[in-house]
Image (tube, helix red, strand yellow):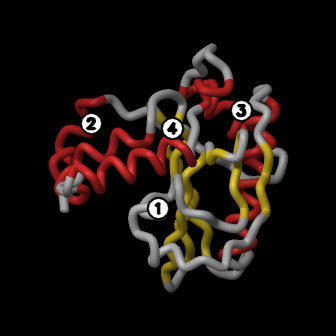
Amino acid sequence: DELTYSLIVPNGHLNHHEIYHAFHTILSEALLALNYPVNLHNHKSNDNYLKDSYKNFACFNRPAFTEIKWQNKKIVGSAQRLFPNGLLQHGSILIKGRQSKVLKYLKMESIQKEKMEFELDHSSAALSDIDSNEISKSNLSAAMIKQFAKYGVNLIYSDYVKEELLPVKQDILELFII
């Protein structure tokens, strides 16, 4: 169970590094306000994440400069896509469960899946790992909306029902099966 998010920023505001840092700073403040003892990890890795594919194949185990962590495990998997007119910042916050569940959708050898599962399980955590009292997506979203509003950023929460997602489900699965 996870909360996914998207932030769209038109060009001319901040560069993509500043946006990534600002987004994670404000998001970590929202998580701290909910009593999740996360920290903002600012460490630039000089490693090429394309070099060790099984260790860095997903945003939850790939290092970036500004990460939200708990006990040195990533809580937020985030990525950016740059476009000519703006930027898309998107990602997920794992509420419960394991990121390694996504591996069942990948076609690959069992040994490689096992290595990837180990890496994901040791580099990421869910909010339920921090506090067994499960938070709802709407409460987590409300905290984010409140915190971002302090900085003049208006977020919108939308909870799609399964019936609305059924037409795109097959397309999404086709993207993950390689």
Say above or below: 29 vs 133.
below
Between discs 3 and 1, the one toward the N terminus: 1
Residue depth check, mark 4 versus mark 3: number of the one nearer the observer: 4
Name the kind of residue labelled 4 in the image.
Answer: Leu
Q: Which mark is residue 143?
A: 3
Sequence-first disc among 4 and 3: 4
Q: CA–CA distance between discs 1 and 4?
A: 24 Å
- Mark 3 closeness class: few <14, some 14–19, many ≥20 residues within 10 Å: some
* Viewport quadrant of the N terminus: top left
Spatial CA span between label 4 and label 3: 12 Å
Label 3: which secondary element: helix
Regarding mark 1 in the picture, which secondary structure is present there? loop
Cα–Cα gap, marks 2 and 3: 25 Å
Q: Which numbered disc covers residue 164?
A: 2
Q: Which residue is mark 4?
A: 3
The residue at 56%/76% (across/down) is 86
Circles 1 and 4, Cβ within 8 Å, touching? The answer is no
Q: CA distance from mark 1 to mark 2?
A: 34 Å
Q: Earlier in the sequence, mark 1 or mark 2?
A: 1
Foreground tag (1 vs 2): 1
What is the distance, in whole Å, between disc 4 and disc 2 at their CAs? 17 Å
Q: Pointer 3 and pointer 1: residues touching (CB < 8 Å)? A: no
Camera-nearest label, 4 or 2: 4
Disc 2 marks a residue whose amino acid type is Glu
Q: Residues within 10 Å of mark 1 (few under 14, many from 20)?
A: some
Relative to 16, say whether 127 is above or below: above
